[in-house]
Amino acid sequence: MAATLTIQPLDLQDPADYRRCRELQRLVFGEAFDPAMLEHARDCHPATFVLGCWDGDRLAGCNGFLAHPVRLGDRSALAYQSCISATHPEYRGRRIFQSLIDSARATLKQRGAAFMFGFPNENSEPIFVKKLGFRRIERRMALMPLPAAAPLLTACYASAPLDMSGAGAATVVTFDARATSIWKSRSPAGPIEIVELGASLLLGRVTDIRMLGRPARLLLVGGYEARDRRAFGSLLAKARRQTGASLAGCMLPADAPLARAARIPLKDNRVAPFIVHPLAWSLEGLTFNAWESLLDIY
């Protein structure tokens, strides 16, 4: 990156910084720009931050880092999601994006953050993987009749507490669905369904689709908290009653048993990949419950 460019934080609570970031996003993405994503970064977890690349007082690029509580067995920490990335067209080819990620990586190591992650598009994925050393995890859509989801899980998994990866609990990194549901319920991006039953919780979005030429209602599961299969089965039953959905959809790592065992085959069930980079935690041998509610704030 040229010496005239500097990396400094953006304060999205400051109207001037927020306006600069919004204008850059609008310039780069045009009609595809969704201000709800920027508003979410401003209003979500207090540890979230945005870095800007500055040419004097001109914003040449920016990248956000959303803080997410995560658990691994009895360990807990924050992981950071790369998001709201934009580089001014006049500054492309000057390694601004890489410099922003490198600067954040150094900051987050000092903070003791567990890892960085993201859901890159086809343009940013090669930079993340080939130039920044992120690991790519392919994901698949698992689709099944909602009443059959609980017994299918029981057939697929032998570990406890319940997880969706097929690995033991000590090797599964779990994102905090309850914290995500709180942030999402305040997000202007659109309503989500929150289903609660005792200490258990499920969040997702409901959409009407056509399956085999017939109308159907799909609950796209964005995350859950449930201690065992019985609680999860009861939660799914309540979700069906509350939402009227007949199908459940989950985005999971491609090698997860549920992704392989889904009852309804899809012609092409590939979805945006999940990428991850270690910081304070070693990620060798781990799997990730990277739920769709994380992606739809990307």
Image (tube, grey):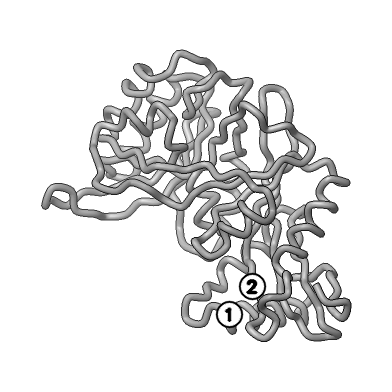
Amino acid type at circle 1 is Val
- Say which quarter of the image contains residue 263: top left
Q: Which residue: 76% across, 60% down?
A: 49
- In which quadrant is the C terminus drawn? bottom right
Packing grade of label 2 (10 A; few <14, some 14-19, many >=20) is many
Q: Indicate whether 81 appears above or below 96.
A: above
Q: Position of residue 101 (x, y in %)?
A: 74, 59
Amino acid type at circle 2 is Ala
Left or right of residue 150, residue 90 in this image: right
Asked whether the residues under the numbered discs 2 and 1 touch, taking CB atoms below 8 Å apart as contact, a structural biologist would say yes
Disc 2 on helix, strand or loop?
strand
The mark that comes first in sequence, 2 or 1, is 1
Q: Which residue: 66% across, 29% down?
A: 284
Which one is nearer the viewer's eye here, 283 or 111? 283
Packing grade of label 1 (10 A; few <14, some 14-19, many >=20) is some
What count of labels does the image hold? 2
On residue 28, which mark appears? 1
Q: Indicate whether 29 appears above or below 294.
A: below
Q: Position of residue 296 (x, y in %)?
A: 50, 56
On residue 154, which mark appears? none
Q: Which residue: 55% across, 57% down?
A: 120
Q: CA distance from mark 2 to mark 1?
A: 6 Å
For disc 2, the marked residue is 86
Q: Position of residue 39 (x, y in %)?
A: 63, 68
